[in-house]
Image (cartoon, rainbow, N blue to C red):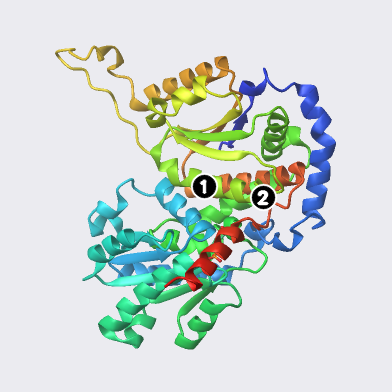
Amino acid sequence: MNREIVLDIHGTSDFVREHELDALETQVLSAHEKLHRYEGPGREYLGWLGWPMHCGQEEMKQIVRVADWVRKKAEVFVVIGIGGSYLGSRSALELLGHSYYNEMPREKRGGPQIYFAGCNLSATNLGHLFDLIKDKEVVINVISKSGTTLEPALAFRFFRNMLENRFGKKYARERIIATTGEKGALRELARQEGYETFTVPGDIGGRYSVLTAVGLLPVAVAGIDITAIIAGARHGCKLYDEDRPAHNPAYRYAALRQLLYRKGKVVEILAAYEPSFNLFTEWWKQLFGESEGKDLKGIFPAGVNFTTDLHSLGQFIQDGYRNLFLTTLWLDKPPLDQDIPLLEEDVDGLNFLAGKTMHHVNDKACAGTIMAHSAGGVPNMKIIIPEMTPRYYGQLVYFFEKACAISGYLLGVNPFDQPGVEAYKNNMFSLLQNSD
Ligand code: PA5
């Protein structure tokens, strides 16, 4: 039997008492009811809630078919998207793939190199990518639910232009895959040009869309088992459906965040001890940041990559302003481990570690850090993931999606809109329209 993802909350006991959690139970129950009865704010965006249970077999087959075609055809696959339209797939690729996937020989990868574009407005970044791929067989997946987001729309304009100029419209249209909403500019263009198209369901917001074609197509192109990802999410769906926080780790996590927030802990730092979690942390930051940071409220989601950042931000966490708490993502069994060699001359004095493994050292670094941060007044939780497989990835995604929804309702916000994002866009467009 598979081991479960575990939430260890011992590191909060000096800051939150059990009776405080009990007192919040009624509010958690009410948040659960609101969510599951589709009665809370943002109820029109709850498609993600039951998605793993009923995402269509036909669509899964289409994703696998198209991904197989891309794997054979392309030397380079470019995913164009921003926010929820790229963070999920990129996090899965980094967590489930080889750390140096793009640098590996083609025979080992079994598919194309995968690059991301359209997630910034940097001409340099775009130009450097063009340098890299200019003579290669390229297939593009442009992902934008709205079809109007400037960053991916501009990047797509460049790529489309490049493909069309190179070999004509027919050549380009055979190499462009669009993932977009039911209507909008990109949908219309895809229809006119006859692009292969996937639909982002109208009731699933960008940051909740990783388990749809938005996330799954790029992941399948890397040869990762997307059926197992959905199976893991489905398992999460059942597991995190329980309404009592004591029996539901996702709700317990949400409740503890809320109690810590009420005590002035307004920054949550997600810490992982494997660099392959970096993009997952970015995905998590978007999920919680866009969902909760509104109405002048919210926990600021930050991320650190340990042990690297113990040599930079570790100082602040240990010793700086006391308004933060830490959530550690711990991988019990990493994909690889390495025995530390015994050297004849013990110049570095590390022979006492010979025979132990790197992961053992990482484990002690994690335990030591948690002890130190606890002593420094930082509440902490630990989420233990048995190993990083597609199945656990799907379950972990669903864990955080569910926790985020409940957390948003406990905070009293609509976790499914992002009105604040419009402010910069409005200013940028009016400045662009009035510029020379
Ligand atoms: O969560 C969201 O909805 C946003 O962050 C979007 O994912 C992001 O703005 C990209 O939007 P779109 O897919 O419409 O280009």
Q: Which sits in the foreground, 435 or 164?
A: 435
User: Residue 158 sits in which quadrant?
Assistant: bottom left
Using the image, determine if residue 37 lies above or below residue 189: above
Where is 406 relative to 321, above or below?
below
Residue 87 sits above or below residue 198 on the image: above
Q: Could one spot residue 1 in this view of the protein?
A: no
Q: Estimate the x, y position of residue 373 in percent, counting from the top left.
A: 53, 20
Q: Is residue 338 left or right of residue 18?
A: left
Q: CA distance from mark 2 to mark 1?
A: 13 Å
> Picture quarter containing residue 160?
bottom left
Q: Is residue 360 left or right of residue 27?
A: left
Q: Is residue 126 left or right of residue 272?
A: left
Q: Quadrant of the N terminus?
A: top right
Q: Earlier in the sequence, mark 2 or mark 1?
A: 2
Q: Are marks 2 and 1 in contact (CB under 8 Å)?
A: no
**Image quadrant of residue 37?**
bottom right
Residue 423, placed above or below residue 74:
above
**Residue drawn at x 22%, y 55% as measured from the top left:** 105
Q: Which mark is residue 393?
A: 1
Residue in the image at 77% along x and 52% along y: 35
Q: Which amino acid type is marked by label 1?
A: Tyr
Using the image, tell me which numbered label, if any, was put on residue 237: 2
Query: Quadrant location of ligand 1?
Result: bottom right
Of the residues shown, which amino acid type is indicated by label 2? Cys
Rendered location of residue 34, percent (x, y): 81, 51
Residue ID at (28%, 64%): 127
- Give whichever of 151, 188 is nearer the camera: 151
Q: Looking at the image, which residue sits at the far left?
A: 345
Callout 1 crowding tier (Cα within 10 Å): few <14, some 14–19, many ≥20: many
- Name the element at disc 1: helix
Q: Say what secondary structure mark 2 lies in.
A: helix
